[in-house]
Amino acid sequence: MPILNVKICGNPSAELSARVAVAMTGLTVEILKKKRELTAVAVEYISSSQWFIAAEALASQSVGTFYLDIKVTEGTNTKDEKALFVKRVFAAMEEMLGPLAQASYIVVHEVRGDAWGYQGQSQEYRYIQGKVL
């Protein structure tokens, strides 16, 4: 785990999506210490005429924007790791997208281990099984 949902203001681009997936996976593995093989990234695009900041469409502004929502298991990362992740994600996205609106958000959701999982098993179940063995 985790799952990253990235929304980008702009036109769909397979090349940009691939670059974003590589960058977000790399930062997630490096900073948050997550397993590369379990890190999933979904990228969506939203038209600049449908993305608003301060009630103004981005189409009328000279900046780009994005939103990243990442879910990780509760208690598996420190405040410092999360803060560094936010900083480095913003820098990486700015490098790929150009100047960004200040209101470009990164949200790290910490989800309880009993509330999610993969391959049909919760994270809590995996933790308990690891203790039993």
Image (spheres, rainbow, N blue to C red):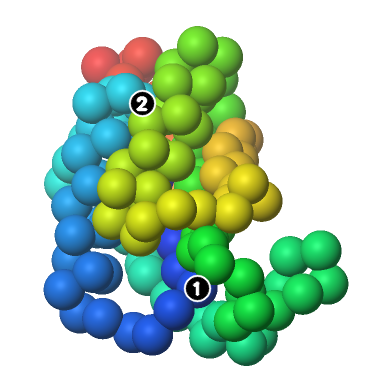
Expressed as whole percent of the image width and height from the top left, the position of residue 87 reads 46, 29
Quarter of the picture holding the C terminus: top left
Count the labels in the image.
2
Residue situated in front as seen by the camera: 3 or 45: 45
Say which quarter of the image contains residue 61: bottom right
Indicate which disc residue 81 carries: none
Badge 1 or badge 2: first in the primary sequence: 1
**Is disc 1 surrounded by few (<14), some (14 to 19) or many (20+) residues within 10 Å?**
many
Quarter of the picture holding the N terminus: top left
Q: Which residue is mark 1?
A: 9
Say which quarter of the image contains residue 101: bottom right
Eye-nearest disc, 1 or 2: 1
Q: Residue visible at 50% across and 73% down?
A: 9
- Residue 112 located left or right of residue 86: right
Q: Which residue is mark 2?
A: 32
Is 45 rendered above or below residue 133? below
Q: Residue visible at 53% across and 62% down?
A: 63
Expressed as whole percent of the image width and height from the top left, the position of residue 35 reads 22, 35
Is 64 rendered above or below residue 22? below
Q: Residue visible at 50% across and 11% down?
A: 80
- Residue 30 located left or right of residue 81: left
**Is disc 2 surrounded by few (<14), some (14 to 19) or many (20+) residues within 10 Å?**
some
Is 19 rendered above or below residue 9? above
Q: Secondary structure at mark 2?
A: helix
Q: Amino acid at mark 2?
A: Leu
Q: Secondary structure at mark 1?
A: strand
Is 58 rendered above or below residue 20? below
Q: Residue visible at 81% across and 64% down?
A: 54
Expressed as whole percent of the image width and height from the top left, the position of residue 88 reads 37, 31
Residue 72 in sight in this render:
yes
Q: Amino acid at mark 1?
A: Cys
Distance between mark 1 and mark 2 Cα atoms: 26 Å
